[in-house]
Image: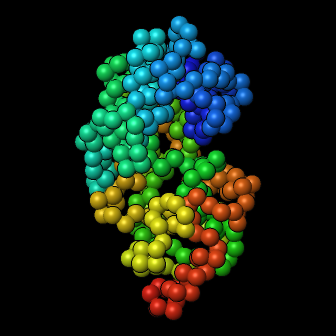
Amino acid sequence: MDILILGGTQWLGRELAREAVRRGHDVTCLARGEGGEVAPGARLVVGDRSRPDAYDALGDAEWDAVIDVTRQPGFARGAADALAPRARHWTFISSGNVYARHDEPGADESAELLPPLESGESTPETYGEAKSAIESAYGEAVGGRLLVIRPGLIGGPGDASGRSGYWVARAARDDEPMLVPAIGGSAAQFIDVRDLVGWTLDSIERGLTGRFNAVGDRSTFGAFLDASQAVGGYRGEVAVATPDWLSAQGVAEWSGDESLPLWIIDADWQAFQDRSNAAARAEGLELRPVDETLADLLLWEREQGLDRARRAGLSAARERELVAALRAAGAGRPEE
């Protein structure tokens, strides 16, 4: 197939290009070329999607499939105008953030969406509305040729956000007391990037259309932590702190500097990591075991350096400070 990827120089787009090339497809990536290199074997066409001539370098080529991962509605509207008539199949990698509510465990694709963002540019605060707008724009432009994939948290080797790899990397780093939030029974759900990419390309190859939650199987933070500790070989104590105590100490939730990844305070978001993947499963989505993902992720984390400054997670020094404060306050309990 002749596949055009709008982007393709950052993690997910590059992995899509890499796997498509491996499968024997001809892959072109339209990008500014500033975010990284394209996968070996793919062709880079330089284009700035903020400019009206962004797609001129593609000429009048026609495509068996177009894939877009953008978060900018203006980019999507421009692509739809320029390319929709020349694409046999169109895939948009959307997000679970498009849903209006995140407090319904097991919700499926029929759940209400956020209103589409009217602006052409999104911000972190309007990410969900922006993705919703792009779904709408492509739905109008390509109709029944559209495949919309809504991942939640994407993890696995190459996850530069640091979220999916923090706990297994922490488990492998040392056996000093590990600080964890007291959310063992809370939902935790992620999909290995390789499983997401594989199913996306399988779906494109057979012309699948529709809207699908491409997420991992429903599980809990406790199960994910146990698996991370087992893969990382952790043998130390676990210091459990309540979310309220952690928040009072300035520990960030979910992601970011000096955070504890994957925990969410807001009750309205407790099911963000708890969506149904039944529709995608019925269409062939296969998921590797979590411990396999964690083992491969740990290899990648070791290559990056277990003691490096992270985009998500606690530094060793900050964790020691917090554990000492927790014990001094009698607010937590060590667990073997």
Q: Nearer the viewer, residue 57 or 92?
A: 57
Please say which color scheme the image uses: rainbow
| Figure check: 174 above or below 123 | below
Q: Is residue 96 visible?
A: no
Residue at screen point 47% across, 67% down = 252
> Quick one: quadrant of the N terminus?
top right
| Residue toward you, 138 or 283 | 138
Instruction: Compare residues 200 and 159 and report the one nearer the observer.
Output: 159
Residue 154 image offset from top left, x and y in percent: 52, 47
Q: Position of residue 18 (x, y in %)?
A: 65, 31
Task: Give me the residue at 51% from left, 73% from top.
Answer: 180
Q: 214 left or right of 158?
A: left
Q: What residue is at 64 percent from the left and 74 percent from the top?
A: 316
Residue 14, quarter of the rendered image: top right
For residue 236, which quarter of the picture?
bottom right
Tell me residue 172's x, y (percent).
68, 67
Q: Is residue 70 above or below residue 305?
A: above
Which residue is at 60% across, 40% downward? 11
Image height of 236 relative to 167, above or below: below
Q: Position of residue 174 (x, y in %)?
A: 70, 73
| Quadrant placement of the C terminus | bottom right
Relative placement, left or right, of 205 versus 297 is: left
Using the image, determine if residue 113 lies above or below residue 335.
above
Q: Is residue 119 left or right of residue 180?
A: left
Which residue is at the far top?
60
Residue 248 appears in the rendering? yes
